[in-house]
Image: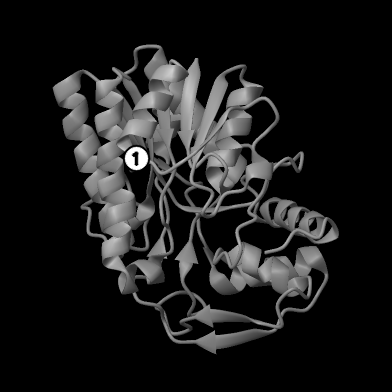
Amino acid sequence: MNVLVTGGAGYIGGHMVLALLDAGQKPVVFDNLSTGFRWSVPDGVPLVVGDVGDHELVLQTLKAHRIDAIVHFAAKLVVPESVSDPLGYYLNNTVKSRSLLAAAVAADVKTFVFSSTAAVYGNASDKPIAEDAPLSPLSPYGSSKQLTEVMLRDVAAAHDMRYAVLRYFNVAGADPAMRHGQSTANATHLIKVAVQTALGMRSHMEVYGSDYPTRDGTGIRDYIHVSDLASAHLQALTHLSEGGESLVVNCGYGHGYTVSEVIDTVRTVSGRPIEVRSAPRRAGDPVSIVADSSRIRARLGWEPRYDDLSKIVEHTLRWESMLRERNFRF
C-alpha cells in the first residue's frame, strides 16, 4: 500500500513512517520541514517538501506516487500558542486540512486517517473520557482539530471515503531502537523538558499551575508512548484498507499521572536533580484528561506494548542523550 504521511518528517509522523516500513508498506513523506527534519526520513522513502495547503503540489504527489491512503499528522500543536494566535491555528490545522481533503477527493483516495487530539474534549471530569463525551475544546488548537473532524466526516459521506479519527492524549517517548524521537527545537512536551533539565540542557523547568483540584495540585494527563500511538494508526489504516467501517477512537492508556509525579519519575530514572519553579496556569490547559481506550481495544484489537511511565522516560532519556552526543542543534 502506498501511504502519504503528512508531517512525516516530524515526531509522531516519523514514527508512523517507521511503523509502515516495519509492516512492509510504502510510505511517502510530505512535510514543509518547519518542525520536521530531512535527516529523519529513512533512506529510500520519498520526501516531498511542501505545504499541505498547496493543493496542486499535493494533488500532483498523490497521483505521481499512486497513493492509496493518507495519514494526516501535519499541524500546529502548542495549546498556549493557539490561544495567542488563533487565526494561525485555524489556517494551518483547519483550512489547510480542507485543501488536503479536496486533493484527496480529486485523486480518488478513499482511505484517510486523521491524527486528532484529546483537546477536543476540553475540561474533562476525573473519570476516563469516552469518545461519545460532549466536545467542548478550551483552546483554538482543540477547536481547529474538531472542525477538521467534522469536515472529514462530511467529505467521507459525500465521496464514499472511509476514515479513522484518532484522538490521542499526551505523547512521549522515542523509538525503542533509537531510530527516531522528539527533536524539535523548544519543544514543550513535559517529559522531554524534564529530561533535558535532568541532563543539564536547561537550568530549570516550570510547572504551570500548582493549585488544581488534584492529588498534589498539578494537572493530570494520560501519557502514551509514541510507538504505541504509531501502531494504533497502523491498525486503523489496516482496518480501513480491509473494508472496515469509519471510526473515531481514543488513544491513551486509561490512567493518568500528575505533573509532579512525572517529574519525580524522571528524577528516579535519570538519577539526577531537577530544579522546578512554579508558574501560573496556562490558558487552555484542562485540569485532568484521561482516556477511556476500551473502543480501540475492542474494535482494532489494539494492545499497547509500552504502558510504563518509567520505560517512556527511559526511552526519552536515551534519545536526548544521543542527540546531545551527536551535537544536533535544537
Vertical side of 304 occupied by 189: above or below? below
Residue at 60% across, 58% down: 184
Give the quarter of the image for residue 58: top left
- SS for callout 1: loop
The one nearer the camera, 185 or 20, is 185
Residue 60, x across and y down, in percent: 38, 25
Relative to the observer, which residue lies in front, 150 or 260? 150
Amino acid at circle 1: Asp
The image's colour scheme reads: one colour
- Give the residue at mark 1: 54
State which quarter of the image contains the C terminus: bottom right
Occupied quadrant, residue 62 = top left
Q: Is residue 109 left or right of residue 207?
A: left
Residue 157 position, x and y percent, is 16, 25
Q: Residue at x 63, y 69 (%)?
A: 193
Q: Is residue 17 above or below residue 109?
A: below
In this rendering, is residue 273 above or below 316? below
Residue at 39%, 46% in the rendered image: 292
Q: Is residue 124 visible?
A: no
* Residue 173 pos. (x, y %): 65, 51
Q: Is residue 86 visible?
A: yes
Counting from the top left corner in percent of width and height, residue 215 is at 49, 75
**Farthest residue in the top direction?**
242
What's the residue at 71%, 69% (across, down)? 196
